[in-house]
């Protein structure tokens, strides 16, 4: 099954540690969406990403072909427990993306893919650490320069200063 990564799973090292059976497919865009940070994560010390409707914008990401076992691991990492469970952090959704640069040199095309949509808790700025992982993956995957520039200027949460 195809999986669209748009956040920290753009980082191939992280993705391969979570989903060792995955295979690269190519660069993709979710049209009329942008990256938002509607959910707080203690693990990342700030907001974590999710697609948000935004007419005229593109959310760039990367497609992987994943196994059923990889999907089960992603469910666990993304905090999906079961349908309608109030404890779900992210919800798996099937979306349509434009595969604009397939790694196998096949023609660009629209495809259906799995992604995860955050259940909003409290919109927060991302931590520098989280945004740096996204940027690392985005650069390695050669996402468009304009998109990289947008990511580079996103505000980040100030690190907490320990009280003395």
Image: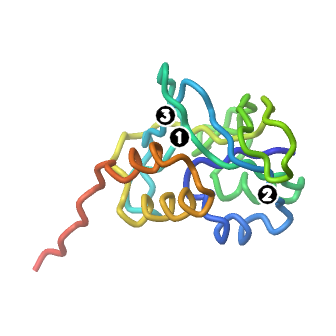
Residue 1's place in the image compared with 72, above or below, is: above
The alpha-carbon separation of the residues under discs 3 and 1 comes to: 8 Å
Q: Kindly identify which residue carries mark 3.
A: 34
Q: Kindly identify which residue carries mark 2.
A: 24
- Compare marks 3 and 1 and give the one earlier in the sequence: 3
Query: Going 69% across and 64% down the picture, which residue do you hit?
Result: 15
The one nearer the camera, 10 or 122, is 10
Element assignment for label 2: strand
> Mark 3 and 1 residues: CB-CB less than 8 Å, in contact?
no
Q: Picture coordinates of residue 2 (x, y %)?
A: 82, 44
Q: Quadrant of the C terminus?
A: bottom left
Instruction: Please state which of the two labelled residues, at mark 2 or mark 1, is closer to the viewer.
Output: 2
The one nearer the camera, 82 or 74, is 74
> Mark 2 and 1 residues: CB-CB less than 8 Å, in contact?
no
Query: Going 45% across and 43% down the picture, which residue do you hit?
Result: 146
Q: Quadrant of the N terminus?
A: top right
Which dot marks residue 153? none
Quarter of the view holding residue 156: bottom left
Element assignment for label 1: strand
Q: Picture coordinates of residue 29 (x, y %)?
A: 63, 36
Element assignment for label 3: strand
Quarter of the view holding residue 70: bottom right
Residue 22's place in the image compared with 71, above or below, is: below
Drawn side of residue 106 relative to residue 31, left or right: right
Q: Picture coordinates of residue 8 (x, y %)?
A: 56, 58
């Amino acid at each position: 099954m195809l999986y669209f990564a748009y956040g920290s799973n753009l980082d191939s090292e992280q993705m391969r540690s979570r989903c060792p059976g995955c295979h690269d497919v190519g660069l993709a865009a979710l049209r009329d969406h942008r990256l938002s940070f509607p959910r707080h994560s203690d693990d990342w010390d700030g907001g974590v990403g999710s697609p948000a409707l935004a007419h005229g914008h593109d959310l760039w990401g990367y497609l992987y072909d994943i196994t059923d076992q990889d999907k089960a691991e992603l469910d666990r990492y993304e905090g999906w427990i079961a349908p309608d469970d109030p404890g779900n952090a992210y919800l798996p959704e099937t979306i349509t993306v434009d595969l604009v640069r397939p790694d196998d040199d096949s023609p660009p095309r629209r495809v259906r893919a799995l992604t995860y949509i955050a259940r909003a808790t409290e919109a927060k700025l991302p931590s520098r650490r989280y945004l740096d992982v996204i940027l690392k993956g985005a650069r390695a995957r050669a996402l468009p320069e304009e998109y990289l520039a947008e990511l580079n200027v996103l505000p980040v949460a100030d690190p907490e200063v320990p009280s003395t």
